[in-house]
Amino acid sequence: MLDETLEDLKSNIEKAHDALRRELAKIRTGRANPDILDSIRVEYYGTPTPLKQMATISVPEPRMIVLKPFDRSTISSIEKAIIQGDLGLNPSNDGELIRIPMPPLTEERRRDLVKVAKKVGEECKVAIRKARHDAKDMIDSLEKDGEVGADDAERARNEVEDLVKNASAKVDQIVADKEKDILVV
């Protein structure tokens, strides 16, 4: 039972790290990154459709994203959705391709994005602490029910603390790497 509890904790920590990476990928850096377009939904035959399902996305240069829509008639609606996406991007099209130049970030905007990254990292830590709380409650209930001994329960609690400490350090490292990406001019 203790092993299952620890495995659940490890699984929850890994899910929190994955969610953190996904959220941080959406934060814009100075370089072109197709992941920032993940949140864009295009109105297509009355249905909000993810941009990735409507166009091929490529990054031919460090400061340019190029979209090649599968259906040329959707170019204007894709452009409109990108502008309304509130990403600060200005797409332009030539009838076949949509080019999205990535404007350089100002120092103030970089600092704001670092704050956003740190906030996302803190939310991840909160999720990890919640998983720790759940694991400790499970260990306590197993000990109370007599399914595990006091020594085993204490050992499991110590392992939970070690896992959470390492997971929090990993979150700090992931956020620091993203912060470095954001601050590079």
Image (cartoon, helix red, strand yellow):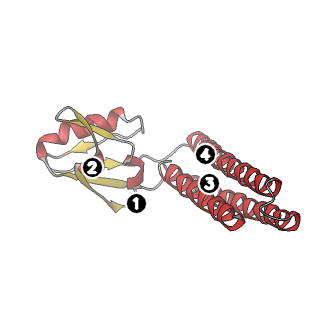
Q: Which mark is residue 120?
A: 4
Quick one: SS at disc 2?
strand
Earlier sequence position, callout 4 versus callout 1: 1
Kind of residue sitting beneath label 1: Pro
Quick one: SS at disc 3?
helix
Tag in front: 4 or 1: 4
Earlier sequence position, callout 4 versus callout 2: 2
Quarter of the image for residue 83 reads: top left
Give the Cα separation between the discs numbered 2 and 3: 27 Å
Q: Is disc 3 surrounded by few (<14), some (14 to 19) or many (20+) residues within 10 Å?
A: many
Residue 142 image offset from top left, x and y in percent: 76, 57
Kind of residue sitting beneath label 4: Val
- Return the residue at label 2: 99
Give the Cα separation between the discs numbered 1 and 2: 13 Å
- Return the residue at label 3: 179
Q: Is residue 40 left or right of residue 140?
A: left
Tag in front: 3 or 1: 3
Tag in front: 4 or 3: 4
- Return the residue at label 1: 62
Residue 162 image offset from top left, x and y in percent: 78, 64
Earlier sequence position, callout 3 versus callout 1: 1
